[in-house]
Image (spheres, helix red, strand yellow):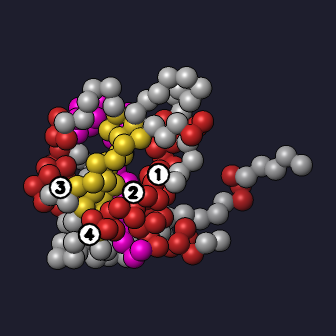
Amino acid sequence: MNEIIKNRRSIRKYRPDMPVTREQLNQLLEAAMYAPSACNSRPWEFIAITNREVLDEIARIHPNAGMCETATAAVVVVAVPKDGWADGFYPQDCGAATQNIMLEAAGMGLGTCWCGVYPREDKMASLRGLLGIDGGKIPFNVIAVGVRDEDGEARGVFEDSKVSYVE
């Protein structure tokens, strides 16, 4: 198994003195945009945040995003639902983009933590208001990003009992 996948962790404590650069954020966003999507619909937009006041406000309004207080950046994945063949697949597509961001960050030596927003109406409304997200678009999640100040715990493990084979 790929070591980046095996060693990726959800990081909740970051080094506030070591900022994430725009170049690093662009690398993460490029990785996101290489994610697969239904019918290549690419139903996403991204908001890259390095503003300290906005990061602190995210930590205040999102009960599970307290790590944004020490993160030096965050990416908000915004779902843009589309009609047609790809209708309704945006959660999978945005999830794939999110995973690409997290794996790319791990490969770069950065830590991340995925903080869910969708489908919680209260969290979506708070982020829409804070970031000026149009009502037809869906704040899908917040990904805290930064230089890790902890190792995080391994939580993944292969469980043979959860696998069935059709041969």
Q: CA distance from mark 2 to mark 3?
A: 18 Å
Q: Examine the rendering and report whether any part of residue 56 can be seen.
A: no
Mark 3, residue position: 55
Instruction: Confirm or deny contact between disc 1 and disc 2 (CB under 8 A).
Output: yes
Residue at image point 56% right, 30% down: 86
Q: Secondary structure at mark 1?
A: helix
The number of numbered discs placed on residues in the rendered structure image is 4
Q: CA distance from mark 3 to mark 1?
A: 23 Å
Residue at image point 46% right, 43% down: 94
Mark positioned earlier in the residue sequence (4 or 2):
4
Mark 1, residue position: 33
Residue at image point 28% right, 48% down: 47
Q: Secondary structure at mark 4?
A: loop
**From this viewpoint, which residue is outermost toward the left?**
53
Disc 2 residue type (three-letter): Leu
Mark 2, residue position: 29
